Structure formats: structure tokens, C-alpha cells
Image (cartoon, grey):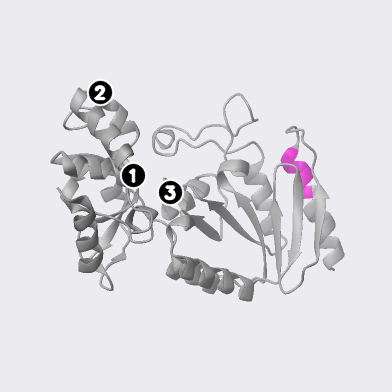
Amino acid sequence: MDLDKYIADEMLKYKGVCFPVKSSMLKRLITKKVKCSSLHPNPVDEFCDPKVGPSYRIISEYEKKYIDGTKHLYGDQDEKDDPIIIEKMYPEGYIIVNGHHRWAASMRLRRPKIAVRIVNLTHEDDIKKMLENSNHDKRITLDLDEIVFGQEGQDPLEKRLPFPLNLEYKERLRSGIPALFNHISKYGYDIWVYSSNCYYSMDYLKQLFKRYHVKVDGVVTGLGNNSKEERSRIDKLIADKYHTTIHVDRSLVLITNTGSKDFEEKEIGSDNANWSLKVMMIIDEIAKKEK
């Protein structure tokens, strides 16, 4: 198989006619494997950039694993635990979000199917809808992986969701996150959560927070998989909407004003104990100044 030619043909075939579409939750849950030939390389990934291109060393390493039997023809448990991340694509098939080299190795070995995980990432139209549904001009942002989700044995955590919800929603919120979100919303702030992780579906995260009785206004996942032009347009849409953005980190709160280089930092401290309460007190202080 001439992989370079195949990628070039795919780019030409779908240029200007393909785009990601949403996949239903049921479809995402039941789809575990798909035909390798129904997956399409992502034009914004460096894998498809002729100046960068695929790494044949990495592809060869995956081929060797498959051939040696460390990963069986139809995917062993290791492969199921590390599936290729894909989005449903119009007019057909799926676009690869993460896992191009594994897909390439499978194609070269003519493997019939490969383990996948379907996600709905955040795109420009989704951002527009989020902004249109908001009546606020200020927001608070938090990183999902660094701030909102905690690690067992490292962070105080909220109780697991009851069975069977805990089987679907396995992420653990840090203790106090639901109370913090509820407190923030009372002051008229939109709550935006971010993740560069492409494993999260936008609608999945909204439902997760709903299970904890809180609402998030903006969910951004896998933004690095958008083109530079689309990310630039998204940044402008957000800047035009919000005059104030407060970013909450583990050790500080950063307040910035759109159109101004001025910013202010509020120290939270490095101690995890009562972290959410400390953030609430800082938000209270900011709200008083705004009045």
C-alpha cells in the first residue's frame, strides 16, 4: 500500500465536501469497532501535512506489534483500552481525531476492523450556539483535567454517582466543585470548562455535570483538532461576548478584561483543603468590587 498516495487521494476526495456531524449517545455506546477503510485521515493533523507526514518508524512499530501477536487481528484488551478516537463525518464514515499511526499500520496490514471510540468534539457552530444561549457578559473558566477532575489518593473527591450511572460516568469531580459552580452561577457568570483531551464528548460532559445538579454554559473539548482559522474565529467570538474572564487555577484566580492588558491575580494557596471555599471567597470579593 502506498500510504502517501492514499492520504493525498483522501485529502483530494473529501476537500470541501466533508465536515464532522454529531453522533447519538446510543451510537457512541454500542460502536466499539469499525472497518479500517471507513476511517479517514484528518486534514488538520500533521499526519496529513506533506511537510511533516506520517512517521513510518512509528507505523512499523505498530505493525510489528500486530504481527507478533501482542495485539491480535481483531484487537486484544490493550487495544480496546486505547482505541482510535473518531468523529462521525459527512458524507460518510468517520474522521480520525487521534490514532493515525495505528490506523495506518492496520491499513497496511489489511486488518478488517479496529477498536474505536466515537466522540462529539466542540466546533465553531457549537460555540456560537453556547454564546447565543447566554445573557451574560462575564465568564469563569476551569480546565477539566487539571482543576475539575481529581485523582484518587491525591485530591478530596465528590462521592461517586450511584449505580448504574457510575458505570457510564467514571470521572471523579474534586470535592466542592458542584457547590462552587452553584455559587458562581448566582453572580451571573457563565461557567466554561475546557479540555484539550479529545476523549470527552461535549454532550457527555454536559450530562455529567447535570447529574451533579449543576449547569455548565460552555464546554470546549479537543479544540486543538480544529484548524488555526477556526480557533482564531472562536477566540474572536468569545472576546466579543465577554468583557471579563476569570480563570480558576489550582493555586490562583486570574482576572482579565477584554480589550485591556490589565489583569489581577488572587492567590488561593497550594493546600487542597477547603479549596472550593477559598475560591468562593475570592469570587465574593470580586463581586463586591463590581458593585
> Which of the two discs, 1 and 3, labels the residue nearer the N terminus?
1
Q: Say whether residue 32 is visible.
A: no
Residue 68 lies, in percent from the top left, at 21, 23
**SS at circle 3:** loop
Residue 290 lies, in percent from the top left, at 83, 67
Residue 85 lies, in percent from the top left, at 34, 46
278 left or right, relative to 173: right
The residue lying at 20 percent from left, 23 percent from top is 69
How far apart are labels 1 and 3 at the CA level?
21 Å
Q: Is residue 38 above or below residue 101?
A: below
Amino acid residing under circle 1: Ser
Question: Where is mark 2, residue-wise?
Answer: 70
The residue lying at 16 percent from left, 31 percent from top is 73
**SS at circle 2:** loop
How far apart are labels 1 and 2 at the CA level?
21 Å
Q: Main secondary structure of the magenta part?
A: helix
**In the drawing, what numbered circle is on residue 198?**
3
Amino acid residing under circle 2: Thr
Instruction: Report the mark closest to the observer, 1 or 3.
Output: 1
Magenta stretch, residue numbers: 275-280
Amino acid residing under circle 3: Cys
**In the drawing, what numbered circle is on residue 55?**
1
> Which of the two discs, 3 and 2, labels the residue nearer the N terminus?
2
Q: Residues within 10 Å of mark 1 (few under 14, many from 20)?
A: few
